[in-house]
Image (cartoon, rainbow, N blue to C red):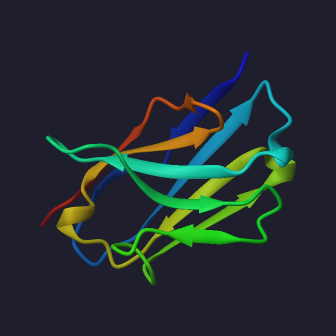
Amino acid sequence: QVQLVESGGGLVQPGGSLRLSCTASGIIFSIYNMGWYRQAPGKERELVAIITSVGSNTNYADSVKGRFTISRDNAKNTVYLQMNSLKPEDTAVYYCKLPPNYWGQGTQVTVSS
């Protein structure tokens, strides 16, 4: 069956960086667009970034443009989210999503001094 496993979250100081990974199994990964989403406490889940199946196009939420970069390695069935210049408001559980509606378990990112 389809499985998505995120990793790479943690506690980081404002201005720091983290790289999240999401590895998929049970699918032909290279034919799917992939997305990263996040959900902060008391807020709805929101789209952070998406990438097309071969990585030729990406799109970002305005709040992360210029700071976050989504990428993928289809040979490793993995999508990444490089997060730089992190802010306290980036604190959330981050999820990867595979269409139509497959989600990983999430990885916690906490930005705090």
Q: Quadrant of the C terminus?
A: bottom left
Whether residue 75 is situated above or below residue 61 in the rendered picture: above
Q: Is residue 25 left or right of residue 51?
A: right
Q: Position of residue 33 (x, y in %)?
A: 71, 51
Whether residue 1 is situated above or below residue 90 in the rendered picture: above
Residue 67: quadrant of the picture? bottom left
Q: Residue at x 85, y 47 (%)?
A: 30
Q: How many marks?
A: 0
Q: Is residue 82 left or right of residue 71?
A: left
Q: Nearer the viewer, residue 46 or 112?
A: 46
Whether residue 18 is situated above or below residue 2 in the rendered picture: below
Q: Residue at x 50, y 70 (%)?
A: 60
Q: Position of residue 6 (x, y in %)?
A: 53, 40
Q: Is residue 82 left or right of residue 63?
A: right
Residue at the top extreme?
1
Q: Is residue 103 left or right of residue 41?
A: right
Q: Quadrant of the N terminus?
A: top right
Q: Nearer the viewer, residue 108 or 56?
A: 56
Q: Position of residue 54 (x, y in %)?
A: 83, 61
Q: Residue at x 61, y 57 (%)?
A: 80
Q: Position of residue 35 (x, y in %)?
A: 57, 51
Residue at the bottom extreme?
66
